[in-house]
Image (cartoon, coloured by chain):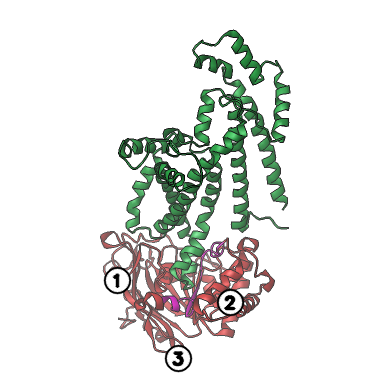
Chain colours: A red, B green
């Protein structure tokens, strides 16, 4: 496995303070390696977007990071903790090292500014010495890269279709050649054909430019196809993390298995779609023990009492994956 | 361009309707100017004198209302607003042009100051939501719900008096003649301070509130988060992304309030006996002075329409979504 580019260690994020706080992300440990696509899946409210906002320090109030570290390894430089950066250093870090493509393809662009303005103001903010001519040339180049004719530079967002807008956002994300691109449900607002087209293009760009991707979605079928590794979140915790093929072939956590059982396979024998009974947990009043146990078909004695730790399972491929489930008790916890 | 012409046609139509109403409404008010003069002189006028007054005011011709209407339009196009009854035989245009500068300067300057001050404070309060600026909100809500004239009355009651710096009425010292000299101008400024403050205090809060609320709404938009994520400075995000978008409703509000400058603060001018258009209109009403009333209404109507047109143009320039292609 290649070297890490982003390491999340024991990250905790809560909305609100004190007793009223809702803990949306709990003790998350996750490592993103150079050049890989890491998928992050889970139901609504599982904390996947909060995790993304937390590690870039973009949490809207009243969200606060209550603990943990986010270690960033710049290309050929000294690693540092993103959460400890000063405001000025954080501004330099943002977009230069990690760019984000957001959920709302429609609302990510400011309606009153031209595309060109929104593309070039990043360049202006990060490299004030760059000439206007080269800024425009760079913006034009990025549009071409994502398959939009550069003569749309002077268009306003409302003159573009949803797919084009999301492509502009992807072009914008890559304009400073970041090491990490976080995609927060980038294609949810688009139709299936457009989804596929845009993701295909992104993967192709990744191979060419060599950045790493954290791909957040609730659509596990997309992840199985497009990502190298998949992490499954439930109730603010990571419950399973494994290579995409391994999760697809045999998911160890009953929740992952449930997610996989809720969409049809393209090939292979027909099987019944099962889904997961019940509904996601209330983050304010989490069940004791494993938060999934009230919905888990395989729950047994220890599940209600103790929280299982994310660790290497005893399976043959145990060295490459981790799971937090009492069915697979671990000797080697991840992190800590 | 087509859009612009459409708007222009619409405004021309509105202007026609307004002028027509402007012609009819004073004629529907019971009483006529001669009657009001008769009451003024408490029956000391002989019937011959009354007859003479009717002839003098041109009310004896028994012309039907349609002929009067046509004659009115002819007059308008030749720039003639008629002669005032109360200040007979001064032309209405002369009376208006002598009172208009007072109103324009007093209300105009305060409106502009109030808009820029209020919008600026609103941006700050909206962007720094949750800080001490939130403490100002109840005060602004209170002030914006207080009517101008009430504030004026309170100000006169509390701040003016025989030895106060603030005069309680008029636009300048009664011993002075209007002129651009070192005696008149300071006096005019001194007289305008209290009405100006009254208008400013009660109108600035409206701008603060609306701007702050728009800022708060816009601040939760996705493109603001994107702007932060892009690593732009807080100042740039606040001005170029949040305030730029939040400003739109306030700009159209501002253009509209420019239209109300001319006629707007009638009550303040009455309270302070300020020699502006509003005060003039009040006097014209009391004296059934049709020509003067019509003249003032006409000026107010036209300025409101022009302001509306300006608001349309401003919106066209500021919001690309309102522009049509081609």
Q: In which quarter of the image is residue A210?
A: bottom right
**Residues at marks 1 and 2, common chain?**
yes
Start and end of the magenta stretch? A90-110
Quadrant for the C terminus of chain A, please. bottom left
| Residue sitting at x 59%, y 85% | A208
Q: Nearer the viewer, residue A257 or A130?
A: A130
Give the Cα distance between marks 1 and 2: 38 Å
**Residue at 44% in and 89% down:** A3
> On the rendered structure, is B55 left or right of A44?
right
In the drawing, does residue B290 fall left or right of residue A287? right
Could you tell me residue B196's position as x and y percent?
Answer: 43, 44
- Residue A205, magenta (yes or no): no
Q: Name the residue under label 2.
A: A202
Q: How crowded is mark 1: few (under 14 residues within 10 Å), some or many (20 or more)?
A: some
Where is residue B228 shown, x and y percent of the image? 46, 69
Name the residue nearer the viewer: A3 or B312.
B312
Residue for badge 3: A76
């Amino acid at each position: 496995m290649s070297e890490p580019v982003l390491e999340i260690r024991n990250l905790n994020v809560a909305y609100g303070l004190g007793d009223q706080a809702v803990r949306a992300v709990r003790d998350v440990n996750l490592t993103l390696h150079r050049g890989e696509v890491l998928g992050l899946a889970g139901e609504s409210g599982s904390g996947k977007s909060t995790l993304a906002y937390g590690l870039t320090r973009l949490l809207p109030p009243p969200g606060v990071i209550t603990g943990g570290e986010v270690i960033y390894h710049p290309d050929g430089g000294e690693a540092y903790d993103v959460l400890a950066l000063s405001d000025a250093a954080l501004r330099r870090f943002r977009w230069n090292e990690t760019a984000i493509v957001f959920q709302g393809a429609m609302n990510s662009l400011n309606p009153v500014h031209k595309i060109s303005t929104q593309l070039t103001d990043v360049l202006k903010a990060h490299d004030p010495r760059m000439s206007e001519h080269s800024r425009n040339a760079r913006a034009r180049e990025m549009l071409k890269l994502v398959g939009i004719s550069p003569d749309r530079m002077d268009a306003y967002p409302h003159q573009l279709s949803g797919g084009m807008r999301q492509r502009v956002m992807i072009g914008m994300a890559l304009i400073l050649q970041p090491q990490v691109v976080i995609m927060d449900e980038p294609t949810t607002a688009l139709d299936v054909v457009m989804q596929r087209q845009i993701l295909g293009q992104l993967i192709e760009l990744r191979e060419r430019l060599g950045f790493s991707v954290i791909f957040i979605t609730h659509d596990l079928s997309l992840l199985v196809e497009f990502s190298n590794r998949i992490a499954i979140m439930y109730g603010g915790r990571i419950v399973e993390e494994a290579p995409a093929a391994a999760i697809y072939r045999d998911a160890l956590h009953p929740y992952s298995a449930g997610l996989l059982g809720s969409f049809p396979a393209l090939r292979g024998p027909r099987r019944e779609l099962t889904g997961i009974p019940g509904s996601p947990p209330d983050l304010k009043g989490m069940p004791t023990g494993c938060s999934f146990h009230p919905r888990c078909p395989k729950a047994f004695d220890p599940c209600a009492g103790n929280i299982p730790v994310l660790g290497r399972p005893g399976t043959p491929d145990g060295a490459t994956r981790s799971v937090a489930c009492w069915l697979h008790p671990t000797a080697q916890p991840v992190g800590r | 361009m087509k859009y612009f012409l459409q708007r222009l046609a619409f405004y021309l139509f509105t202007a026609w309707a307004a002028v027509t109403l402007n012609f009819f409404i004073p004629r529907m008010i019971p009483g006529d100017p001669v009657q009001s003069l008769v009451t003024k002189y408490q029956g000391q006028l002989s019937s011959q004198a009354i007859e003479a007054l009717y002839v003098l005011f041109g009310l004896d011709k028994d012309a039907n209302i349609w002929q009067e209407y046509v004659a009115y339009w002819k007059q308008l196009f030749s720039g003639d607003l008629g002669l005032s009854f109360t200040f007979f035989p001064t032309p209405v245009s002369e009376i208006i042009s002598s009172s208009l500068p007072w109103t324009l300067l007093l209300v105009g300057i305060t409106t502009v100051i109030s808009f820029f001050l209020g919008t600026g404070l609103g941006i700050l309060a909206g962007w720094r939501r949750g800080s001490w600026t939130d403490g100002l909100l109840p005060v602004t809500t209170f002030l914006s719900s207080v009517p101008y004239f009430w504030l004026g009355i309170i100000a006169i009651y509390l701040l003016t008096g025989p030895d106060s710096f603030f005069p309680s009425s008029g636009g300048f010292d009664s011993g002075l003649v209007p002129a651009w000299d070192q005696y008149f101008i300071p006096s005019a400024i001194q007289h305008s301070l209290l009405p100006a403050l009254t208008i400013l205090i009660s109108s600035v809060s409206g701008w603060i509130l609306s701007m702050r609320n728009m800022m708060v709404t816009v601040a939760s938009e996705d493109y603001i988060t994107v702007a932060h994520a892009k690593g732009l400075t807080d100042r740039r995000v606040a001005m170029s992304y949040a305030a730029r978008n939040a400003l739109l409703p306030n700009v159209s509000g501002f253009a509209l309030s420019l239209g109300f400058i001319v006629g707007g603060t009638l009550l303040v001018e009455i309270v302070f006996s300020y020699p502006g258009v509003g005060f003039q209109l009040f006097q014209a009403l009391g004296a059934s002075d049709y020509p003067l009333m019509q003249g003032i209404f006409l000026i107010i109507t036209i300025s409101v329409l022009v302001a509306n047109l300006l608001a349309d143009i401003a919106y066209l320039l500021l919001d690309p979504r309102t522009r049509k292609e081609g």
